[in-house]
Image (cartoon, rainbow, N blue to C red):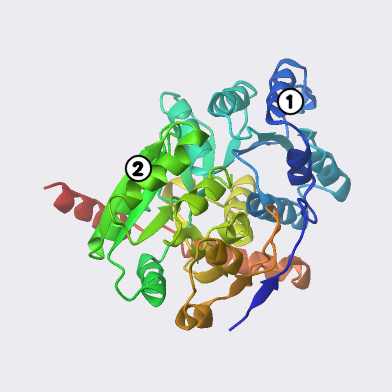
Amino acid sequence: MLRLLVTGGRCALAGSWSFERICLAPRALLLALFSLLILLPRASQAADDTVPTLAFLRFGQSSSFALTDRAVLDMLETYGFISADERATLEAGVDLRGEKINILYRDAGFDFPTANLMVEDALDEGADIFLTVSTQVGMIAVNAMSELENPPALIFAIVTDPHDSGLATATCIKSPNVTGTLMHFDLQEYARTAYLQDPDFASIGFIGDANDPATPGFVATARRTVERLGFRVEIATIVTAADYAIATESLLDKDVDAIGILPHTGSSTGVASIVEAAYGVPVFSSLVSDVIHGVTVTAGFEGWYREGVQAARMVIAYLEGKLDIATTAIASTPSFAVAVNLDSAEAQGLEITEALLAEADYIVQGGAAEGMALEIPGEIALAEMTLEERRAEDAAFLENLHCAPDMIAEQLSTLGSAGG
């Protein structure tokens, strides 16, 4: 069992220009700058129409999201769509008018109105293909394209549940211009991890953000899957950051055995308040990287870089004319990891069991700064493969996603049975 001991750090991320700037710049300044950029002429507006335009749109930023971002740029550079110099332009936060591709490189921060403007702006600029990172931007893009006669292609990544979020009905039942990658969560393993800490575990309370359009989907997924495992689920919602402690206390009043943090865009807002208010009760998350934000136990998704590679495979194949999005299923790659924050456990007056520690892939102790990156095992080392090897592996991956007619018929039949 691999074990990583994180013993300190600062607000920085190797290889990521954007996260450090977000650490240093006030949120209001970032939003003001973004709004100003929307009004200014861009290089992409004068772009050569003979090359495709990719709208690479993100919502929220963190060390985890930066891994997805890096993976996409790694793949585009590996396939020769961007040069090292062009990549540097993107990493400086500037849209690219490239020799082989134009890229609208946008990040809305954590502001929903800005995210809507970002999507509308990309549509106005005539982007041929959208790559959206986060459930929120995927939802906004799908809604914005819903009434277009000839919508651009849309590939989404870092999406918890495309079905409950309205991005798709099933892996092969979706709009013909839409596909993407699904974050895989093994909730049975998640529950088993809770049992390792508390053999009498029987209930969990989740906290959701009422301002987030993805929250209803997150809540529906959590409630349906956790209750299916036989646990009691309680839900509390917050409107402002000041509500996190109150919401946590309301869940504790309902005698839950653990507090759960729903999947989110990477923001650590509220985690400290939740952990402090949940004294004596462990705080769980299904995003392994949340351990660096102070969550007591994290168990589940860890493939931030991998998901960027998977989505980029689809983007590149589409750009090369080798991918029919209408018959490409939504991808899901099983994986699972466990992390424990012993600092948070001590602050909560909790003792982590030996059984849980034995399962941990990562242990944080001695002070872990928010923003530190966990390099998760399984990151694909593109530099170790030739382009021919890369192409062969990517082609095999995409071939496995082909929606054959019998697969589509089976999914339609299943949906019909469920509806009846």
Vertical comparison of 264 with 2: above or below: above
Vertical comparison of 408 with 342: above or below: above
Locate residue 344 relative to residue 356 in the image: left or right.
right
According to the picture, the residue beneath numbered tag 1 turns out to be 29
Kindly report which numbered mark, 1 or 2, lies closer to the viewer in this rendering: 2
Mark 2 neighbour class, 10 Å CA radius: few under 14, some 14 to 19, many 20 or more = some
Q: Looking at the image, which residue sits at the far top?
A: 39
Q: Which mark is residue 129?
A: none
x, y percent for residue 290: 56, 57
x, y percent for residue 46: 78, 22
Name the amino acid type tagged 2.
Answer: Ala
Q: CA distance from mark 1 to mark 2?
A: 31 Å
- Regarding mark 1 in the picture, which secondary structure is present there? helix
Q: Looking at the image, which residue sits at the far right?
A: 85
Q: Looking at the image, which residue sits at the far front?
A: 349
Q: Which residue lies at the image location 25% right of the left edge and 62% below the top edge? A: 231
x, y percent for residue 399: 50, 63
Locate residue 362 relative to residue 44 in the image: left or right.
left
Name the amino acid type tagged 1.
Answer: Leu
Comparing 201 with 72, the one in front is 201
- Regarding mark 2 in the picture, which secondary structure is present there? strand
Q: Which residue lies at the image location 45% right of the left edge and 60% below the top edge? A: 284
Mark 1 neighbour class, 10 Å CA radius: few under 14, some 14 to 19, many 20 or more = few
* Whether residue 93 is visible: yes
According to the picture, the residue beneath numbered tag 2 turns out to be 236
x, y percent for residue 87: 81, 46
- The quadrant holding residue 250 is top left
- The quadrant holding residue 114 is top right
